[in-house]
Image (cartoon, rainbow, N blue to C red):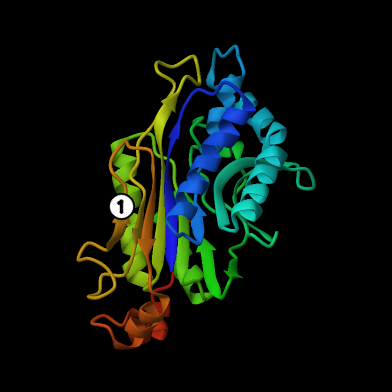
Amino acid sequence: MKIASSQFRARKLRSMKDFEDHVRWHVESAVAQGAELLLLPEFFAIELLTLHHFDIKSTEDVTKIFEWFGKEYTAAIKQLCANLAKEYEITLAAGTHFAYQPDRKCYYNTAYVFTASGAVFEQNKIHPSYEMVYNKELTTPGDKLDVFEINGVTYGISICYDNSFPEVARILSQMGADIILAPTCCLDEWGQSRNILFAQARASENQVYVVNSHMIGSIPFPTHIPYGFTFTGKSGIYSPIQPMIGTPNAIVSQGEANVEMVVVGDINLDYLKYIRENGHNRNRTDMRPSFYQQYAFQTT
């Protein structure tokens, strides 16, 4: 099975069609390389903000803009990605977006997955971070984790900061996920390095594949800080550290720094399941849950 991860360059747009063509290019690149699924990064649609002029004087102004953004563009982004999934007959894991949920009257950082058949899956980020506007309270924490099956493959989603918590990937793997999708957005090399390390670790700890998609590039937003947002990342596909399934550093495939591209890797789910019972490290069968429970604790 081939799976793809976008290394998505944010840029200044001229029109909504410019954005649509940008996303389409990534989908076409994945399909041309034979991928069955494409993962876009966290906040891949952030470049839509460059279609508007904002008078920004403070972080509070930026927060209000993101609140507007979550209401203004969610429907259009979902419709675009649903259409592309159907048109190209691919599963499109459309990164994340600030999404307003009217029934709860709050915002979530939500990942959407669209299938060629029209099914839609969602996962809200469990651990909100500062979400680029330095306002951790802008989004509400998700309150559940789900896995979903597409064409016989079970997936889970761990959004950026969520992947730094081993519990999230462990729960998803115990729920049956063989592939964990980790859309990510980093503003510096420290964030990039952390997220790559977390993807490698979660893959080996849980004997799953982890697909990690990053933003690169920059946009002239927000205007009250020099250079606006500049993104750094290196997208990749990671496996357990086992012979015959990956490399000694868990890399199945990885992007070239600061180059917009679609990274594609071959993954073998049958062999993944085989190594869980027969590999050098058999994390799943060698776990000792009753022992761990002696040391279970809650933080305050």
Q: Is residue 68 left or right of residue 260?
A: right
Above/below status of 125 relative to 222: below
Most extreme residue toward the left is 248
Above/below status of 55 relative to 186: above
Q: How many marks?
A: 1
Q: Is residue 106 left or right of residue 236?
A: right
267, 45: nearer the viewer: 267
Q: Is residue 295 left or right of residue 46?
A: left
The answer, for residue 125, to whether it is visible in the render is no
Q: Quadrant of residue 170?
A: bottom left
Residue 48, how many percent across, how many down?
A: 58, 28
Q: Secondary structure at mark 1?
A: strand
Q: Which residue is located at x 47 percent, y 27 percent?
A: 11
84, 42: nearer the viewer: 84
Q: Which residue is located at x 51 percent, y 50 percent?
A: 127
The answer, for residue 284, to whether it is visible in the render is yes
Residue 196, how many percent across, how many down?
A: 32, 52
Q: Residues within 10 Å of mark 1 (few under 14, many from 20)?
A: many
Above/below status of 59 relative to 107: above
Above/below status of 101 relative to 299: above
Most extreme residue toward the right is 103
Q: Is residue 76 left or right of residue 300?
A: right
Q: Quadrant of residue 239?
A: bottom left
Q: Amino acid at mark 1?
A: Gln
Q: Quadrant of residue 208?
A: bottom left
Residue 16, how many percent across, how many down?
A: 63, 28
The residue singled out by tag 1 in the image is: 254
214, 202: nearer the viewer: 214
